[in-house]
């Protein structure tokens, strides 16, 4: 009969779990500002000239553009608890995002070039009304701790 020390078994389990976390592609990085919570149909992320699949759990970074196709929709949760949902044929760019989890201060600037967007603002807008903006081809919305829906038309038919 071979006996293993309980400490050795627990250490092995902890090391295995730690390795899985450290080497998992889903691990958050300092550049991550949000995460895809739901995606349906054709959805991708444009980052640094690449098209990446947008699946549940995909991380969103500042300067990413999220694009949905004719059958696509996506829901994104940001680290300040802002929730954005884009409908079919939408192009949403995260232009600037900074958030201090201690003070809840920050800025959140996005651009909806086309499509529909539903927003439930998070801690940034509650802390500093107007610190969250959504630009469209026709207007700039300053968000003040609220919920809203906006539609943007790029003029292309």
Image (tube, rainbow, N blue to C red):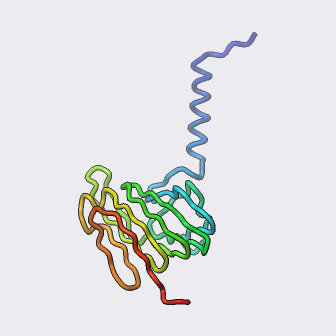
Q: Quadrant of residue 43?
A: bottom right
Find residue 156 and report its horizontal and vertical position in percent.
53, 89
Query: Relative to 9, is 83 above or below?
Result: below
Q: Quadrant of the N terminus?
A: top right
Question: Quick one: 16 or 134, which is closer to the camera?
Answer: 134
Find residue 108 and report its horizontal and vertical position in percent.
35, 66
Q: Residue at x 56, y 71 (%)?
A: 68
Q: Residue at x 55, y 72 (%)?
A: 88
Find residue 101 and report its horizontal and vertical position in percent.
32, 51
Find residue 10 and report its horizontal and vertical position in percent.
58, 24
Q: Is residue 28 left or right of residue 79?
A: right
Q: Quadrant of the C terminus?
A: bottom right
**Residue positioned most to the left:** 128
Question: Quick one: 94 or 149, which is closer to the camera?
Answer: 149
Q: Residue at x 36, y 71 (%)?
A: 109
Query: Relative to 25, is 148 above or below?
Result: below
Question: Quick one: 76 or 21, which is closer to the camera?
Answer: 76
Query: Relative to 81, is 65 above or below?
Result: below
Q: Quadrant of residue 5?
A: top right
**Residue positioned most to the top:** 1
Q: Is residue 28 left or right of residue 71?
A: left
Give the number of marks. Answer: 0
């Amino acid at each position: 009969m071979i006996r293993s020390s309980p400490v050795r078994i627990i250490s092995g389990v902890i090391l295995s779990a730690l390795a899985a976390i450290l080497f998992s592609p889903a691990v958050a990085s300092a550049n991550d500002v949000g995460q895809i919570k739901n995606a349906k149909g054709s959805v991708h992320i444009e980052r640094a000239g690449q098209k990446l699949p947008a699946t549940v759990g995909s991380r969103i970074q500042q300067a990413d553009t999220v694009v949905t196709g004719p059958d696509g929709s996506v829901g994104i949760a940001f680290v300040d608890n802002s929730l954005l949902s884009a409908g079919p044929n939408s192009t949403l760019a995260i232009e600037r995002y900074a958030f201090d989890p201690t003070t809840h201060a920050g800025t959140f600037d996005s651009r909806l070039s086309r499509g529909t967007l539903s927003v439930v603002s998070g801690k940034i807008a509650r802390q500093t009304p107007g610190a969250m903006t959504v630009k469209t081809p026709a207007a700039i919305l300053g968000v003040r701790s609220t919920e809203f829906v906006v539609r943007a038309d790029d003029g292309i038919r």
